[in-house]
Image (cartoon, rainbow, N blue to C red):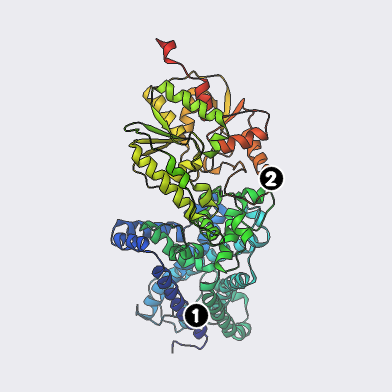
Amino acid sequence: MYFKPFVLPFAVGVLFFFAVLIYKFVAWHWKYNKTQRRAVYKNLFTVRTLEAIWEAIREGLLHNKIWRTNPVLGYMHSSIALGWFLLIVVSKFESWLYFDSFISRPWMGIFYRYFAIDGHRFWAEDAFNFVMDFLLLYVLSGVTLAFIKRFYSRLMGMKKTTKHILYDKFALTSLWFIFPLRLFAESATAAIHHNGGFATQWIGDLMSLSVAQMVQLPLWWGYSIALFIFLVNLPFSRYMHIPAEIALIFSRRWGVNEMDFTTGYTKLEVNACSRCGICIDVCPLQSEANINHIQAAYFIRDVRYHTLTGDTAQNCLMCNRCVAACPVGIESTLIRQEYRAQTKIDKHGNYKFIDTFQSRNSIGHIIYFAGCMTHLTPSIIESMKSIFKEAGDSYWFMDEDQSVCCGRPLKQQGFFKQAYDLRTKNTELINKSGAKTLVVSCPICYQSFKKEYGLKINILHHSQYIQQLLDSGKIQVNKSASKVSYHDPCELGRACGEYEASRKVLAHCASLIEAPKNKKDSLCCGYNLGDAVLDLSDQMKVRDAALKNLLTFNPDSIVTACPMCKKAFMHGNKQKVQDLAEIVAENLLHKQKLS
């Protein structure tokens, strides 16, 4: 008879797990808003589903992104995920061949060695025994690394590892016990019936027959109970990331995105976080200011367990280093904005004063929007005026009187309605102008106009605009002999993916020396408007780390493309600091000199 009472804990655990899993996925999908559901239904039966399947294999099983970030962590995660998956699949085929039935009892593959003892052999039994032992050891190697990571994270290339709550530690411990118990249970059975592979038979041969007979059933019971504990706790612990990450991959491929409010997709993202800890080391507040409780892993954990405090939500530079590093691609900064909004009294703003502004007729021409922070660094504005003049481009300086804001700083702090009101007013002015291009000097404004406004015109950061002018020959510059280090602003680089325009412009003006941490790994200047609670001393620690990185190779000057970053570096550094527009204006080769 192919049944023993010890299979019951496992069977109950599986039934409970799938029942809760189905309930959660249905509930989350039900909380998608109309736009998100429409995206799912529109793309469900398209090539995007096939792309999602391939990505689920690459990331859910192979953990390709973690491999690229940290090969040791990549091996650890993939050995457990891929190894366990293959153990299930291969054991299913093994039991099918042994029992001559593909539709065998569902627990048969999990407890195969205990029941495959009647002497019946099939053509590939020895090969399967070898493969199953190899896969079991493969998983155990990952579990061993996970154990080491918990206590000696630096051996795994991590300065910090995630601090788990007691409940997650309990689930983690049950996972650690599953595979050693399986190894010794199979070895005890192999000692009695000689049906093991190269590892389990070797361990079994080390046991006496009497010891093996005494410990066999307790070990199989222990294995089944460990599976039960893990499966029952999985939907409520950090390990819900295993199925949630796969569902997130599909939803994202189908075109679902975060909104300005929490939806079922937000719940899915929150549950897809494995709390691997990769986001901790890259957070400048952890590495420079020793603030260790507000990182994305902890923010998401607290959201999930309904223990979120205002400090955890508010104290964040919103620099997106955690988002860029996250192997799952969780939009933690957007989720943080949503939860900030829940703590704010967010009334509609009184922006009647903007009604007095008149949109200038700029049909076919350019709108220039400097941005609030650029007005605090007026030399950037003067440089842009020189560039516009040299290029012969007529423009409307939309915020020349400094009275119009893009609204993004309000949105970052959770004042969504007020930010919406500003966007509505600005959109009306821009649409009435008839302009075809909007040029923006502030990356904060650039991201807002690019991602939040829904404008039908061409939106350029001034680095992109200047690059176009140089490429078309509308302006020319002298190339100086100076060596410059370029700082990638957070909102221009990681948030909008623009890294090359500034570098192409600088190639015309100076010799660029890349800092060790650049592009998506660029360090935040510390003065990001996303954090309204960080004190000045901690801001300066973050800034000083960025400056140290930029000055590694002793450049003649520092160049950035963000007025906020320029102000930060000017206050902490005796070396020359310029905006990209300033170095271009300084080196303009005027047309009258060419004639």
Are there few (<14), some (14-19), or many (20+) residues within 10 Å of tag 2?
few
- Residue where numbered disc 2 is placed: 536
Query: How many circles with numbers are drawn on the protein?
Result: 2
Q: Find disc 1 in the rendering and name its residue.
A: 13
Q: Give the alpha-carbon distance from disc 1 to disc 2, as whole Å.
A: 52 Å
**Which of the marked residues, 1 or 2, is nearer the chain's N terminus?**
1
Q: Secondary structure at mark 2?
A: helix
Determine whether 463 is above or below 13 in the image: above
**Where is the C terminus found, in terms of image quarters?**
top left
Where is residue 591 shown, x and y percent of the image? 42, 15
* Image-quadrant location for residue 185: bottom right
Up-down: is 189 above or below 343? below
Quadrant of the image containing the N terminus: bottom left
- One can see residue 390 in this view: yes
| Residue 281, position as x, y percentages in the image | 62, 51
Q: Is residue 452 visible?
A: no
Identify residue type, mark 2: Leu
Report the residue that reaches farthest toward the right: 537
- Residue 394 picture location, percent across and down: 38, 26
Image x and y of residue 154, in percent = 66, 53
